[in-house]
Image (tube, grey):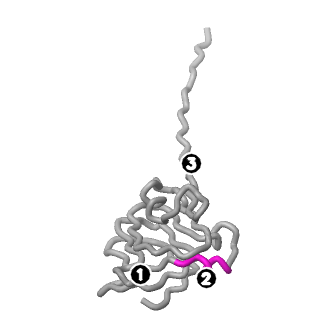
Amino acid sequence: MRKLFATLIILSFAFSVTLEVGPTKPYQEIQAAIDAAADGDVVLVQPGTYYENLMLTKNITVASLAWSGGDQSAITQTIIDGNSSGSTIIIEGTDNTSEVVGFTIKNGFALNGGGIFILEGSEVTLRNLVIIHN
């Protein structure tokens, strides 16, 4: 008599979500989308000027359309302006899966890292950025 063994295989798939930022998108502020994101998600920012000081503490991608469609003009058309009120972007507690891609980052004002301040022990990939007037 043969015995039949059934093997149960449970697969867990992690799906990333794209959170869109822009005047007509679900999020109007980049930080609000970052706060709503989970590790592995993408915060995709439409062209425009965003007067924000961002805190990135998750392993996500924050990108302009230069990331998704390769539209290099998006780099100069998608601006994160720190409004001279601290670092424009602070990165803390992230690993090498974190990315910031395709922005102009400007008007940061801080003793350390006016444009981008990466805290010790954090990792991030920075690509296709223009960092000016910090």
- Residue depicted at x 43% and y 85%: 107
- Residue depicted at x 64% and y 76%: 74
Q: What stretch is highlighted in magenta?
A: 73-79
Sequence-wise, the earlier of marks 2 and 1 is 2
Q: Nearer the viewer, residue 42 or 20?
A: 20
* In front: label 3 or label 2: 2
Asked whether disc 1 touches disc 3, contact meaning CB atoms under 8 Å apart, the reply is: no
Quadrant of the image for the N terminus? top right
Q: Name the residue under label 3.
A: 15
**Mark 1 residue type:** Asn
**Mark 2 residue type:** Thr
* In front: label 2 or label 1: 1
Sequence-wise, the earlier of marks 3 and 2 is 3
- Residue 47 inside the magenta-drawn segment: no
Numbered disc 2: secondary structure: helix
Q: Position of residue 98 (x, y in %)?
A: 47, 66
Quadrant of the image for the C terminus? bottom left
Q: Mark 1 points at which residue?
A: 83
Q: Which numbered marker is on residue 25? A: none
- Residue depicted at x 56% and y 26%: 7
Q: Nearer the viewer, residue 33 or 113?
A: 33
Relative height, residue 90 to residue 17 (above, below): below
Crowd band around label 3 with a 10 angstrom C-alpha radius: few (<14), some (14–19), many (20+): few
Relative height, residue 14 to residue 85 (above, below): above
Q: Where is residue 61 in the image (x, y as percent from the top left)?
A: 52, 64
**Mark 3 residue type:** Phe
- Residue 77 inside the magenta-drawn segment: yes
Corner quadrant of residue 35 = bottom left
Q: Which numbered marker is on residue 76? A: 2
